[in-house]
Image: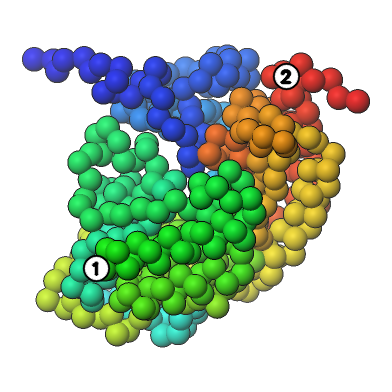
Amino acid sequence: MSPPAPSDKKAGRRGSAVPQSEGDTNLTGRRAAWQARALDADTRALLAEDERYFLRQSVSTPCLNAIAKAEGIFIEDAAGRRTMDFHGNNVHHIGYGHPRLKKAITAQMDALPFAPRRYACEPAVALARKLSDISPFGPAKVLFTTGGSDAIEVAVKIARAATGRFKTLSFWDAFHGAGIGAGALSGEALFRSGPAAPLVAGAVHVAPYSSTRCPYGTATLEASADACARMIEYVLEREGDIAALVAEPIRAVPYVPPAGFWARVRAACDRHGTLLVFDEIPAGLGKTGRMFACQHDTAKPDILVLGKALGGGIVPIAAVLARPELDVGGDWAFGHYTHEKNPVTTRAALTTIEIIEDEGLVENAAHVGGIALERLDQLKTRLPAVGDVRGRGLLLGIELVRDRVGNEPDNALAEAAMYAALDRGLSFKTTMGNVLTLTPPLTITEPQMLAALDIVAAAIEDAEKAVRGYSGT
């Protein structure tokens, strides 16, 4: 017997109005029009097969295009078009298909392809040692998972065991994973509503700081961060029993906190017995110009979570780093995943960190990112549609607005700019509906970055002509 067809409201189909946050939508007329124009018949046939066999879900099915090759900073579609990838789901810090990483993975598969979870193996221990050595808060004890969502849930379990509490505090609009527990921590409607509900009890949220359209009604980033820090302290005091505050040290949208913000939050957590958990899944391992994003401030977390780029853009692995004094749950199982100490994934992660260090990729991210922000400031001066530019290292955002007086988001312009950039050979994603978010690999060169920013500028101008009928001056 076939199940009843779900209503549009329950299924979250095209007619729904789920607020957009960190992902660009895949069910718009503009996307369908771009695909009809830009994709060949063979690609459209493959996408139809993909849609036939994969369950539909917002932001990923149906897919955008078909990929045939990924190398360095480039992806190549099935029709042979080469595109700079400034999206990459933040896994491609060392570029796609790094030869040294592929060689290390191949050698490890030949030597030891798998380790049952009851057994120790040299690559897993070596990775744990390395992470402890480079930890931003000093010596650490670790656990590994296959994905960031699971790692976040492990971190919360550790905090619960250490504090005897169960509540969490996090930001609205943040994304910390797709699991029921991680989704409860997140602030995105796509992962909290519909089939995700009811959520895990005890997940408390506050509005985040913002340099534009502050939810606290302030006019500057500093004032917004001040209001946010005071609200965090207020909630910690009023609740009284929050186990962990879980947040990204730099919001992946991106929004960069002013100096001293996390030090205030760290002090508030200490006053109220709450552990500070930093989610560095998208922004850690050098993306912001430091090995860890939290190193831009003086605040040190109690627990730090890594993922995405840790596997070098080839294998899935995530890690939880905790202060040694939080090793208090030996009677319980926090994860105990089948691939927890997989020698292939741990060798890949260890090699990825070594590549980042040996090739000076953190320093490169800081250097090229600084040049990019200077060029983006010039772009803001030249293009009235650019309401704000912000970022740190190679985590960059360009906010498009209808006008700078009201600062009203221009989602249509941002989406049109994305497709115009794809036509010119650059891929990125939109976040919050109107922010062009650029997250290139750490291997990018200065000339490549400047060429990409020229594409961004031309794409915005093309989009203005298409959306507003603007012809320039």
What numbered label is drawn on residue 304?
none
Image location of residue 346, percent across then percent down: 39, 67
- The numbered disc on residue 241 is 1
Identify the amino acid type marked 1: Asp
Q: Is residue 348 visible?
A: no
> If you read the primary sequence from the N terminus, does the residue marked by circle 2 or circle 1 appear first?
1
Vertical order, 186 against 270 (above or below): above
Instruction: Please state the horizontal and vertical placement of residue 204, each as a whole percent of the image.
Output: 31, 54
Q: Label 2, label 1: how many angstroms apart (C-alpha)? A: 51 Å
Q: Residue at x 51, y 50 (%)?
A: 216
As drawn, is 308 to the left or to the right of 376?
left
Could you classify mark 1 by the number of other residues whose Cα lies within 10 Å: few (under 14), some (14-19), or many (20 or more)? some
Quarter residue 226 falls in: bottom right
Q: Is residue 244 above or below residue 185?
A: below
| Disc number placed over residue 468 in the picture, else none | 2
Residue at 46% x, 64% y is: 230
Q: Secondary structure at mark 1?
A: loop
Residue 372, position as x, y percentages in the image: 76, 53
The residue carrying pointer 2 sits among few (fewer than 14), some (14 to 19) or many (20 or more) residues within 10 Å by Cα, namely few
Left or right, 5 with respect to 296, comes to left
At x 23% / y 56%, what residue is drawn? Answer: 202
Q: Is residue 137 above or below residue 29?
A: below
Asked if residue 440 is positioned above or below residue 428 in the image, the reply reads below
